[in-house]
Image (tube, helix red, strand yellow):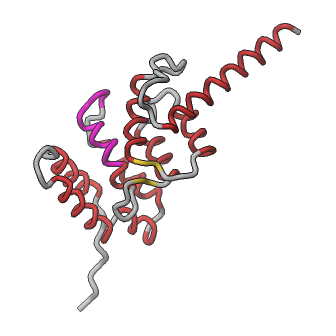
Amino acid sequence: MEPSAPHQFNIFQAFSAYSDIMSKAHLSGAKERLAILSRSLDSSGPTRFVELFIPRDMLINQICNLMCCLDLSVGSHQFNLLYEFVFFICRENGQKSISVNRALAGWRLVLNGRFRLLDEWCNFVGMHQRHNILEDTWQQVLAFSRYVNEDLEGYDPTGAWPVLIDEFVEHIYRFFSFSVFFFYFLTCF
């Protein structure tokens, strides 16, 4: 008898199971069902599968394939679900956070064309964030991308943004102030 092939990770099945659970998240037992799904993925799939059997970019390719099959129009329920799913699928062994590298890859993939400050955000996070990205921060980045313009109009400094977003805004203000000063300095001479 031949040994069976290792269980192949199927992103479409994983997303379908995740979607089903999240559509009933208001019912009791949803957290338990998510934990079961996470354990089943850990035993076959995305994190272990990515690290041991295929490069991480294969997971990104699979997410791209999934994105091609979904209605990802602005504000669509499927886009919001996909965004949450990317965080869920990038966690390692059911952790409540993801590595900075995985977060950056996820943001670049899912928020491309949707977040005007995406490059600046990813560069800032890549240079300044040393700890994993928590789910709350992941969710707040989506809100920030929707409600704050590239000139930071819409940002409320008294709002309940995660510290990382507040630090990013301070960084952008410092950069903008320096750029205006430098431009003024060059035009005066």
Q: Nearer the viewer, residue 45 or 96?
A: 96
Q: Quadrant of residue 181?
A: top right
Rendered residue at 25%/51% (across/down): 15
**Among all residues in the image, which is located at the extreme left?**
27
* Secondary structure predominantly adopted by residues drawn in magenta: helix
Does residue 176 appear to the left or right of 122 in the view shown?
A: right
Residue 25: percent from left, percent from top: 16, 46
Q: Residue at x 50, y 37 (%)?
A: 163
**Magenta run includes residue 79:** yes
Q: Taking 126 as reference, is 112 left or right?
A: left
Residue beneath the point at 29% across and 28% down: 75
Q: How many marks?
A: 0
Quarter of the image that includes the C terminus: top right
What stretch of residues is rendered in magenta? 73-86
Residue 143 within the magenta-colored segment of the rendering: no
14 relative position to 185: left or right = left
Going 50% across and 46% down the picture, which residue do you hit?
104
| Residue 160 percent across, percent down from the top left | 41, 30
**Coordinates of residue 74 in the picture (x, y in percent):** 31, 27
User: Residue 28: x and y, percent?
Assistant: 11, 51
Up-down relation of residue 114 to residue 122 (above or below): above
Q: Is residue 71 above or below residue 133?
A: above
* Quarter containing the N terminus: bottom left
Residue extending furthest toward the bottom? 1
